[in-house]
Each structure stands twice: as C-alpha cells, then as structure tokens.
Image (cartoon, rainbow, N blue to C red):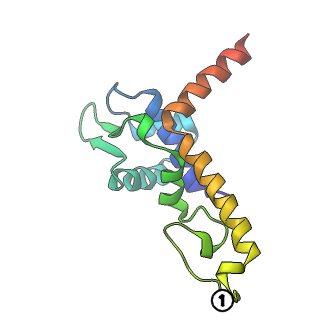
Amino acid sequence: MISKKSKYALNALIHLARKYGEGPTLISTIAEEESIPQKFLEAILLDLKNAGILGSKKGRGGGYYLRKDPEKVNMAQVLRLFDGAIALMPCVTYRFYERCDECKDEETCSLREAFKKVRDESVNIFKKYTLKSLVDREKILKELTSK
C-alpha cells in the first residue's frame, strides 16, 4: 500500500499538471481543492521542489508550479521519492538492493524470480502513467460520466 504522503503528492502534482503553464498555484488552493492538510502539503511540496519536479515563486502571484513537463513526470518517480523501493522484497529492488538473510542462493530462488516479475510489471505500469496521461484520463472519465 502506498503512503498518504505519496497519495497526497500525486494528487497535488495532478492538480498542478491541470494548470501547467498557467503560473504558480498557492499551497492553500491546492490543499483546499484536493482535501490535503496544508501543513502536510507544505512538506510534500518542498520535497518535490528539492527533487527538481516543482519550482516556487515567493510574494504576490507566488506559489508552486511544475518545473518539468507533465509528460516527463511519472508515478514511479513520485512513489520512489516518498516510499522508496517499489519492489516487495529487498533482493529485487532496483535502487535499494539488500540480500535476503534467509536466502541460500539468489540464482535459484523461485520467490525472488516471482517477485522480480511483479516488480518489473509494476514499475512498467507506474512509468507509463505520467502526470499528462493521468490528467488526460481524468478528462475522458469526466466526459463519460457526464453523458
């Protein structure tokens, strides 16, 4: 299960992707419209800024904005930033590898093989879902439900 932090980060990013190119958005606006506690959101947006995904502007007309094109930010990046490894076992993680203590032989471990396949498929799916594709999908679903 993903953390609340990841879920809030994705919702905030989708919000900003909807407004891509329109300038900065206030934290209070994102918090209110996405039902995210503002103090929690402040920390999340700062992490996203430090990761180079967001930029910010101070003062009048300030707020946060996407520094990267919504097509270049995918779910895998965000999940890794806030939750770490996507894999379910440490021996199959991409960036956070650790050998399993109880494993006798990684080369012949059938559990490792199965969990590696799950990891690979999950990562491929999460990489496919960019902020742009999520916003586009949202529009399609709204059109379908309004008919």
In the image, taking residue 57 as reference, residue 8 lies left or right, namely right
How many numbered circles are shown?
1
Q: Secondary structure at mark 1?
A: loop
Between 41 and 133, which is closer to the camera in this rendering?
Answer: 133
Measured along the vertical axis of the image, is residue 137 above or below residue 77?
Answer: above
Between 127 and 135, which is closer to the camera in this rendering?
Answer: 127
Residue drawn where x is 65% and y is 53% of the image: 121
Other residues around mark 1 within 10 Å, as few (<14) / some (14–19) / many (≥20): few
Quadrant hosting residue 89: bottom right
Residue drawn where x is 62% and y is 57% of the image: 120
Furthest residue to the front?
108
Q: For mark 1, what is the residue? A: 101
Measured along the vertical axis of the image, is residue 44 above or below residue 83?
Answer: above
- Image coords of residue 126 (percent x, y): 58, 47
Please indicate, yes or no, whether residue 19 appears anywhere in the rendered image: yes
- Image coords of residue 119 (percent x, y): 64, 60
- Image coords of residue 142 (percent x, y): 66, 20
Furthest residue to the top?
147
- Dot 1 amino acid type: Asp
Please indicate, yes or no, whether residue 29 appears anywhere in the rendered image: no
In the image, taking residue 63 as reference, residue 71 lies left or right, namely right
Between 26 and 113, which is closer to the camera in this rendering?
Answer: 113
Image quadrant containing the N terminus = bottom right
Between 20 and 117, which is closer to the camera in this rendering?
Answer: 117
Residue drawn where x is 73% and y is 10% of the image: 147
In the image, taking residue 44 as reference, residue 111 lies left or right, namely right
- Image coords of residue 81 (percent x, y): 47, 59
